[in-house]
Amino acid sequence: CPAVTGIQLRIISELAVEELAAGRATEEVTPFWRVVEPDSRLAKKLPPDGPGWITTLRQAERGAAQSPSAAGRCAFKAPSKVWFRRCLGDGPGSSSFS
């Protein structure tokens, strides 16, 4: 069912964003950016800059795959905790980020 798939994809994507904000490496979170298109409605709902952020993640991952010295690591830096507090009015450590 497309509706249930969309709901589950949003849950997975938001959890991955929260984990990245908490400082986890991109290799340790579900790589939602591989299946969420940058121009989709879901991408526009994700912080910090949904479509741009997904494009950045994809480019970083593509660059890491092409660079033998990167050994498969993504060079993306997650948004800061300050960004989440400022833009969402909430932050890691609060009940919604636990």
Image (tube, grey):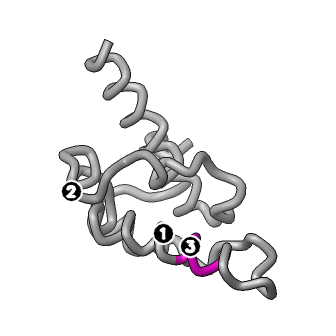
The local secondary structure at tag 3 comes to helix
Q: Which mark is first along the chain, 3 or 2?
A: 2
32 displayed left or right of 42: right
Q: Amino acid at mark 2?
A: Asp
Residue 27, horizontal then vertical, whole percent: 70, 59
31 displayed left or right of 36: right
Q: Amino acid at mark 1?
A: Leu
Q: Quadrant of the C terminus?
A: top right
- Verify whether residue 42 appears in magenta: no
* Residue marked by disc 3: 62
Residue 56, located in which quarter of the rendered image?
bottom left
Residue 68, horizontal then vertical, whole percent: 79, 83
Q: CA distance from mark 1 to mark 3?
A: 8 Å
The local secondary structure at tag 2 comes to loop
Question: What residue is rendered at 66% in x and 80% in y?
Answer: 66
Magenta region: 60-64
* Residue marked by disc 1: 57
Residue 20, located in which quarter of the rendered image?
bottom right
The tag on residue 39 is 2
Q: Amino acid at mark 3?
A: Arg
Question: What residue is rendered at 59% in x and 80% in y?
Answer: 63
28 displayed left or right of 7: right
- Above or below residue 32? Residue 72 is below
Question: What residue is rendered at 56% in x and 73% in y?
Answer: 62
Instruction: Kindly check if marks 2 and 1 are in contact, taking CB atoms under 8 A apart as contact.
Output: no
